[in-house]
């Protein structure tokens, strides 16, 4: 009798209970791993989006830093072509330097043109344009030239530098007056000393819009 009791195993009910407990623990572990995987994927996507935004802002700030600081001729930005393209300066000449213009163009909520030094060609200049079309921020650089008027950038060489752009805004800091929205029509009392760039980026999958701000000094 003692030998039979020592050899007795688990009953069928006990085995079923153990299997059920293991199945529940497996489901809980799988859900936990799935949540961790989803969170990691979302974090990587946000990191990549942030890196692209920083690269775009760094490039725009570099273009502004390389802008021409000497007096430019009136044809430096090729005004006849700008008029033909249905564009017009939106800020008084006293507010922004001649090498930096914010323009309104049909269907484009954001358009900036910069006359900057060509890094690969000393003594030459080029026109660089930034604009938003739809949800994409584009950049295009014209060929370098040593004389004015400078050729306009070819639309075929444009590069999409940032996606999912929900909004964009440009403002200039006028000493004694504060931030002024661009475009603006009121005459300026003194030249702007800073430029504010604001972009609203929509999260992947149509989520919330996150706002990012960069202020660039205009010396």
Image (cartoon, grey):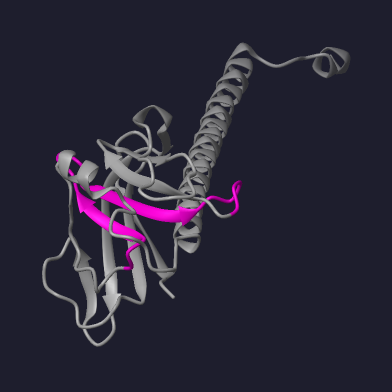
Residue 207 occupies quadrant: top left
Q: Looking at this rendering, what residue extends furthest in the bottom direction?
A: 176
**Residue 117 is one of the magenta-drawn residues:** yes
In the shown orientation, is residue 99 left or right of residue 7? left
Measuring from the top left, give residue 154's x and y in whole percent: 37, 32
Measuring from the top left, give residue 205's x and y in whole percent: 34, 33
Please name the residue shown 31% across and 44% down the image.
131
Please name the residue shown 49% across and 49% down the image.
146
Measuring from the top left, give residue 93's x and y in whole percent: 23, 68
Q: Residue 200 versus residue 110: which sits nearer the camera?
A: 110
In the image, is residue 151 above or below residue 74? above
In the image, is residue 99 above or below residue 104? below
**Residue 186 is one of the magenta-drawn residues:** no
Which residues make up the magenta segment?
A: 97-122
Measuring from the top left, give residue 64's x and y in whole percent: 44, 60
Please name the residue shown 14% across and 42% down the image.
86
């Amino acid at each position: 009798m003692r030998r039979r009791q020592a050899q007795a195993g688990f009953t069928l009910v006990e085995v079923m209970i153990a299997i059920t407990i293991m199945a529940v623990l497996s489901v809980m572990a799988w859900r936990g791993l799935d949540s961790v995987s989803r969170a990691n994927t979302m974090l990587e996507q946000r990191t990549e989006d942030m890196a692209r935004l920083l690269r775009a802002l760094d490039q725009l700030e570099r273009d502004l830093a390389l802008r021409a600081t000497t007096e430019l001729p009136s044809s430096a930005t090729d005004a006849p072509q700008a008029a033909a393209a249905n564009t017009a300066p939106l800020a008084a000449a006293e507010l922004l330097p001649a090498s930096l213009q914010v323009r309104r163009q049909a269907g484009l909520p954001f358009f900036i043109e910069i006359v900057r030094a060509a890094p690969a060609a000393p003594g030459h200049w080029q026109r660089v344009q930034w604009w938003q079309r739809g949800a994409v921020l584009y950049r295009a650089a014209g060929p370098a030239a040593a004389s004015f008027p400078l050729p306009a950038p070819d639309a075929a060489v444009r590069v999409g530098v940032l996606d999912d752009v929900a909004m964009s805004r440009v403002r200039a800091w006028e000493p004694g007056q504060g931030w002024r929205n661009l475009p603006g029509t009121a005459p300026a009392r003194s030249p702007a000393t800073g430029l504010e760039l604001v972009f609203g980026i929509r999260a992947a999958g149509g989520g919330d819009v996150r706002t990012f701000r960069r202020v660039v000094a205009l010396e």
